[in-house]
Amino acid sequence: MDWRIFFTAFGTIFLAELADKTEFAVLNLTAKTKSPWPVFWGAMLAFGIATLIAVLFGEVVAKFVPENILRFVSAGVFILIGILTLLGKL
């Protein structure tokens, strides 16, 4: 295993997910149900499956789309989502 890639992925995702809407949803669900372990395992499974889908999709896309184009499109989509969020359209 390439530990540098592992820790880069871990650090990037960990920092990106801090205080996002998913974390607040988990916090709210835990407070509402007072069942932290089922919420934890359900959230972990959901995030794991979503991540697996992204990894598999990324592997396929990387075979057909050059990295520089992929970065440009990803950045554009990210910016568009941010603008739509600010405008209240998303």
Image (cartoon, rainbow, N blue to C red):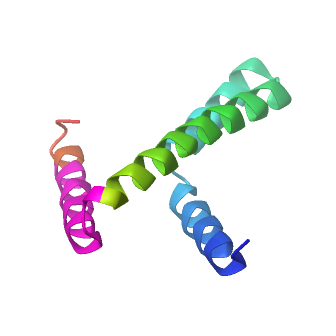
Q: Is residue 2 left or right of residue 12?
A: right
Nearest the viewer among 86 and 53 is: 53
Q: Position of residue 26 (x, y in %)?
A: 64, 35
Q: Quadrant of the N terminus?
A: bottom right
Residue at 21% across / 54% down in the picture?
A: 77
Residue that extends furthest to the bottom in the rendered view of this protein = 4
Nearest the viewer among 47 and 85 is: 47
Q: In this rendering, is residue 63 above or below 2? A: above
Q: In this rendering, is residue 3 above or below 89? A: below
Q: Is residue 73 rendered magenta in the image?
A: yes
Nearest the viewer among 74 and 23 is: 74
Residue at 55% across / 53% down in the picture?
A: 19
Q: Quadrant of residue 31?
A: top right
Count of marks overlaid on the render: 0
Q: Is residue 63 left or right of residue 66?
A: right
Q: Quadrant of residue 51?
A: top right
Q: Position of residue 36 (x, y in %)?
A: 81, 31
Q: Position of residue 42 (x, y in %)?
A: 71, 28
Residue at 61% across / 74% down in the picture?
A: 5
Prevailing secondary structure of the magenta residues: helix
Residue that extends furthest to the top in the rendered view of this protein = 33
The boundaries of the magenta stretch are 64-83
Q: Quadrant of the C terminus?
A: top left
Q: Is residue 76 rendered magenta in the image?
A: yes
Q: Position of residue 82 (x, y in %)?
A: 24, 54
Residue at 51% across / 61% down in the picture?
A: 16
Nearest the viewer among 23 and 77 is: 77
